[in-house]
């Protein structure tokens, strides 16, 4: 299960005068104004009167790291760590158990890790009495990258979870896993859908 696998700084360019209290900073030529999200503030641009500005945050954010780019809702923050030499992991999880996991391997073809990932993710459910069914799966990303692997469904009574475990096919590639369970709200399903729609690999940093 994903349970086992588991600041924001903004700098904008504006000509500003006096500083105001806030959690975010707009800066140019060493002059700053402090702002809070969605809170109007007056900024002196050197004109006849100050200009009113409002700092807002987009509902969808863009993650870019380790050659990976995708969009995610602001309420769900991805995290990154090196899990071993040559293996980097990005994970994004919700309170209901939905999750996205990306692992980048420097020296291994990640296709070799698919069966291991199936085992690690679902053997616990099988031991607990869930029935596991597996079938081949492929995806073509918007950037043309082809992924192949397996779709896995585990179910017991009315409880279930669906996994996609896919990988690129060359050394120095990516293993990608998504999980959505029976308790997942609509927002979780939209999160995973948007992830697949916007995912790009081998993005120049």
Image (tube, rainbow, N blue to C red):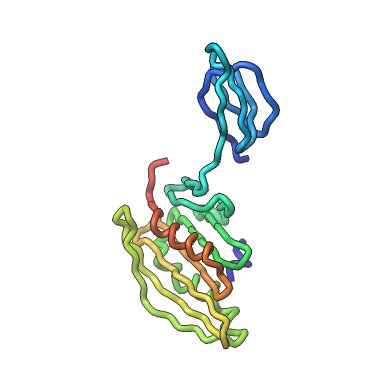
Residue 136 placement, left or right of 160: left
Q: Considering the image in quadrants, where does the C terminus appear?
A: top left
Q: Where is residue 127 in the image (x, y as percent from the top left)?
A: 60, 84
The correct choice, above or below, for 15 with respect to 180 in the image is: above
Residue 194 placement, left or right of 73: left
Q: Where is residue 25 in the image (x, y as percent from the top left)?
A: 61, 28
Of residues 32 and 49, which is closer to you in this image?
Answer: 49
Residue under the image location 51 percent in, 55 percent down? 87
Q: Position of residue 45 (x, y in %)?
A: 54, 16
Q: Which residue lies furthest to the front in this view?
A: 48
Q: Position of residue 79 (x, y in %)?
A: 58, 52
Q: Which residue lies furthest to the right in this view?
A: 21
Is residue 177 visible in this depiction of the protein? yes
Is residue 79 visible in this depiction of the protein? no
The correct choice, above or below, for 32 with respect to 199 in the image is: above
Residue under the image location 52 percent in, 66 percent down? 186
């Amino acid at each position: 299960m994903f349970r086992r696998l588991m600041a924001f700084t903004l700098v904008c360019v504006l000509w500003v005068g006096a500083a105001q209290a806030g959690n975010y900073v707009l800066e140019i030529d060493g002059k700053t104004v402090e702002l809070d999200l969605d809170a109007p503030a007056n900024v002196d641009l050197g004109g006849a009167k100050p200009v009113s500005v409002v700092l807002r945050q987009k509902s969808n954010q863009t993650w870019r790291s380790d050659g990976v780019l995708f969009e995610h809702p602001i309420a769900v923050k991805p995290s990154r760590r090196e899990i071993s030499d040559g293996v980097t992991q990005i994970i994004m999880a919700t309170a209901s158990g939905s999750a996205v996991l990306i692992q980048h391997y420097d020296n291994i073809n990640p296709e070799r890790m698919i069966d291991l990932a199936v085992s690690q993710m679902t053997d616990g459910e099988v031991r607990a009495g869930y029935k596991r069914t597996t079938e081949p799966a492929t995806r073509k990303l918007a950037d043309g990258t082809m992924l192949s692997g397996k779709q896995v469904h585990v179910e017991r009574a009315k409880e279930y979870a669906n996994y996609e475990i896919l990988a690129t096919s060359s050394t120095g590639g990516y293993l990608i896993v998504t999980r959505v369970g029976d308790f997942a709200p609509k927002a979780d399903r939209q999160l995973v859908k948007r992830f697949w729609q916007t995912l790009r690999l081998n993005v120049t940093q």
